[in-house]
Amino acid sequence: MNQHAAARTYGRTRQWIHWLSVLLILTLIPTGLVMARTLDDGLRLTLYQTHLVVGWVVVALALWRVVLRFRQRVAAPADLAPWNRRLYHVVHWSVAAFPLLLAVSGFGAILQNDLLPVLQAGEAPPATLDVATARTGHQVGSYLFAGLIVVHVAGIVRHQTRFGGALAPMLRGRG
């Protein structure tokens, strides 16, 4: 199979990237929610630092995922209706690219509020950020991404219950 041919099963590397990304994103959600609401300075600093490090790892994985999507596309299941096939591709590309947009808005919030020196000094960021533009974009983007993940999982459940085999490409190796 040439590198641009469509595959129906993800290779081990893509499977690891996928499942590691899932785990890390499930870590980002509670750290982001709690760090934005806690009044405990020590906890807020720890959560900001954790959120940043985990977020950058997710960005690296998202970049890797996008490169792999260009190098070898993954075919939609053959039994999908044309509208569903288009939705399949839009959702998969969006899930791959969305973390990059969230990184821009998150880093924008840090820069707008001059938090980089504060975090580097090991000081707790303020409980309320002065400039809310990028922070609001990051929050809205996070909720949209969560909705996109729900659509993705709902599509998997729908396909699994109607046709079976929806999880197989992410659970077994090539061959």
Image: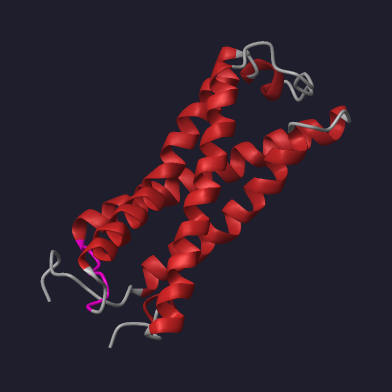
In the picture, measured across the screen, residue 83 lies left or right of residue 64, that is left
Residue 101 lies, with reference to residue 175, above or below; the image says above
Residue at horizontal 43 percent and vertical 67 percent from the top: 155
Q: Quadrant of residue 12?
A: bottom left
> Where, quadrant-wise, is the N terminus in this rendering?
bottom left
Residue 164 lies, with reference to residue 105, above or below; the image says below
In the picture, measured across the screen, residue 62 lies left or right of residue 54, that is left
Residue 44, x across and y down, in percent: 79, 32
Q: Can residue 132 be seen?
A: yes
Residue 146, x across and y down, in percent: 55, 49
Q: Can residue 172 be seen?
A: no
In the picture, measured across the screen, residue 70 lies left or right of residue 30, that is left
- Residue numbers of the magenta segment: 72-78
State yes or no: residue 87 in magenta.
no
Nearest the viewer among 107 and 80 is: 80
> Where, quadrant-wise, is the C terminus in this rendering?
bottom left
State yes or no: residue 75 in magenta.
yes
